[in-house]
Amino acid sequence: MKRFNYKNIEAFVFRLWTREVSEEKISEKEKEILKKWKSHAEKDLDEAHLQESKKRVLAGLEHYFVPYEKIGYRNRFQKNVYKIAAVIILLLTLGGVFTYHTFIKPDVYFAISENRIVHLKDGSVVTLLPGAELTVEKSFPASTRMVDLKGDAIFSVAKSKTHPFIVHAEGFSTKVLGTVFKVSQSGKKKAVDLYEGKVAVSSAGVPVSYLKPNQKWTNLGVARTTAIISFAPDGVSGKPHPKLLSLSFNDVSLKEVITVLEGNYGTKIHYPKEAEDKKITADFTGGTVSENIEALAFILGFEVQKKDNAYILKQ
């Protein structure tokens, strides 16, 4: 179908209206074009929006209709009133579609096979990594600047002490006032790397985490889990050296807890298989490997033994 701009459609409908009022017939071709346009125009509007728009339009047209008692008979004028009203509804529908696409429908940005840089209205810059999708509402920026992200992206947020910037990702969100950070999402594994400023990371079931520069928040691929890792430069080589600052679990199975501990501490932990589904809530912040595994054993009511580079939990 040929794509009309808004003014062309308005002129086309007005011509149809003048012919309708003069009782000229509309050709089958014109009816077909109008039908195709209606289908094309409404395809991006959900049913709830259409119904709400129709109610508003009809309510606004009440004064166009002359009550039957006042006219006393159905004459040509009343017939034309309904025709005019029908055209007005169509014109307002055109305006509704135009308004929806111009002022309501959010802007969606995609990065297909390479990085894409998106400049937001508040001066913030978002670098979408391949496969990422950013959704920005037409109301942006508002008192709270909010965007939705699928995939990975680097944010350089324009500073504002009164207007927080929130990135809603898949299962977690990051809140800032002005900073540079990266949001990563790979399957179940989520992460936020902070380069400048401060951020607060929220995820369901765990306390809010506050990051400083050169720190990373991650769930390590396990729901209701939070880890903060520091990448401060090594005093000797000057290269960033990862250090686990905190590790928290909230109602996480023992099997998943053990997997995380083994992966982060580079050790092996043996435990009774029948206890693998037991739920663990614990905060392993600040302790050594041995202290944290002993704390886990205490929570379980187990004893712990160390053999070479492995730990054995016994009932």
Image: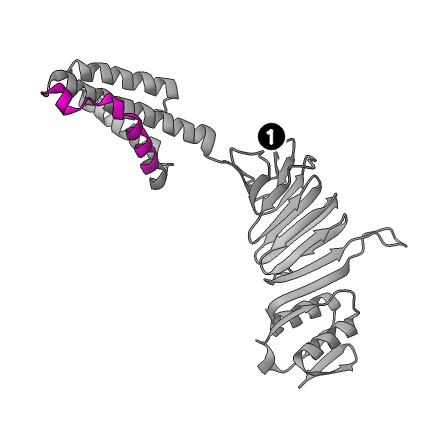
Residue occupying the far right of the picture = 236
Magenta region: 51-72
Residue 130 seen by the camera: yes
Q: Looking at the picture, does residue 306 appear above or below residue 145? A: below
Residue 79 position, x and y percent, is 15, 20
Residue 309 position, x and y percent, is 78, 76
Quadrant of the rendered structure where residue 97 is? top left
> How many numbered tags mark residues here?
1
Which residue is under mark 1?
Answer: 121
Q: Looking at the picture, does residue 160 appear above or below residue 222? A: above
Residue 129 seen by the camera: no
Residue found at x 64% / y 40%: 164
Magenta region, mostly helix, strand or loop?
helix
Q: Is residue 66 magenta?
A: yes
For the residue pair 110 and 218, the one nearer the viewer reads as 218
Q: Quadrant of the N terminus?
A: top left
Q: Is residue 124 magenta?
A: no
Residue occupying the far left of the picture = 73
Residue found at x 68% / y 64%: 248
Residue occupying the far bottom of the picture = 315
Quadrant of the rendered structure where residue 265 is? bottom right
Q: Amino acid at mark 1?
A: Lys
Q: Looking at the picture, does residue 48 appear above or below residue 217? A: above
Residue 148 position, x and y percent, is 55, 43
Residue found at x 61% / y 57%: 189
Q: Is residue 82 left or right of residue 98?
A: left
Residue found at x 12% / y 16%: 76
For the residue pair 286 and 220, the one nearer the viewer reads as 286
Residue 215 position, x and y percent, is 75, 52
